[in-house]
């Protein structure tokens, strides 16, 4: 069975207006996406600059003060934030300015007509819009991961400090040294703050932990 194509109804003025409108939209599509990408790039760049440059996100200056393994987790989060920032910046630049390459002019496939500039601009607009979406998500992900890293430096447990074990005739307190005044040493122990008269101390030594000492308080 063979089919014969027959001409359709003649175009009306409304059809011609719709066709011109659609062609105008396609012609303005790429500049519109590029303008939106520039606005997003500037806005997100200002957001990250404000968060980092003005100290709105600021935690401990030394992650080595965190207890293990929180220091390593903070380092991993900061690395992830850096990768997200670089990826987001590249994608936003791709959306705003196009690929850093010369335009290619491939020959038409057999049996097809060559693509016109409107079709090429539409294809580039689709790529730019996709890069813009991914760039925005990557940049917001960078801000979220950076916030998590800084929050962990705020609320992560600190590394245990040095402990002092003191032997006296009345006991052997052990704890974190707080202060010394008038020949007395204040220690923070599991039982609370203890003050030791250093003049009665038999031995005074630094230890890594009080848990392994018998009779410590």
Image: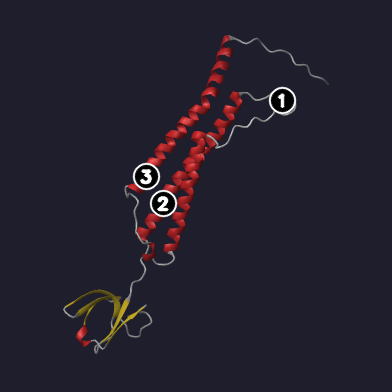
- Camera-side residue of 12 and 98: 98
Alpha carbons under labels 1 and 3: distance apart: 50 Å
Please tell me whether mark 2 or mark 3 is closer to you in this view: 3
Callout 1: few (<14), some (14-19), or many (20+) C-alpha neighbours within 10 Å? Answer: few
Q: Are marks 1 and 3 in contact (CB under 8 Å)?
A: no
Please tell me whether mark 1 or mark 2 is closer to you in this view: 1
- Report which residue position mark 1 lands on: 112
Residue positioned most to the left: 182
Callout 3: few (<14), some (14-19), or many (20+) C-alpha neighbours within 10 Å? Answer: few
- Residue at the spot x=38%, y=55% of the render? 150
Q: Earlier in the sequence, mark 2 or mark 3?
A: 3
Kindly identify which numbered label has been placed on residue 146. Answer: 2
- Residue at the spot x=72%, y=29% of the render? 109
Measured as percent of width and height from the top left, residue 77 is found at 45, 55
Residue positioned most to the front: 102
Callout 2: few (<14), some (14-19), or many (20+) C-alpha neighbours within 10 Å? Answer: many
């Amino acid at each position: 069975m063979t089919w014969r194509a027959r001409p359709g109804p003649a175009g009306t003025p409304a059809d011609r207006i719709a066709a011109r409108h659609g062609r105008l939209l396609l012609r303005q599509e790429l500049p519109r996406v590029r303008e939106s990408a520039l606005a997003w790039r500037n806005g997100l760049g200002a957001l990250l600059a404000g968060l980092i440059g003005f100290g709105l996100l600021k935690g401990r200056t030394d992650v080595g003060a965190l207890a293990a393994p929180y220091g390593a987790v903070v380092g991993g989060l900061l690395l992830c934030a850096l990768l997200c920032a670089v990826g987001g910046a590249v994608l936003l630049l791709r959306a705003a300015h196009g690929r850093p390459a010369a335009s290619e002019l491939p020959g038409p496939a057999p049996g097809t007509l060559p693509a016109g500039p409107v079709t090429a601009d539409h294809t580039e607009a689709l790529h730019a819009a996709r890069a813009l979406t991914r760039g925005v998500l990557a940049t917001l992900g960078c801000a979220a991961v950076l916030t998590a890293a800084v929050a962990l430096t705020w609320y992560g447990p600190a590394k245990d400090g040095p402990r002092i074990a003191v032997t006296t005739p009345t006991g052997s307190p052990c704890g974190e040294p707080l202060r010394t005044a008038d020949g007395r040493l204040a220690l923070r122990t599991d039982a609370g703050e203890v003050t030791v008269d250093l003049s009665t101390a038999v031995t005074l030594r630094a230890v890594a932990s009080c848990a392994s000492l018998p009779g410590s308080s």
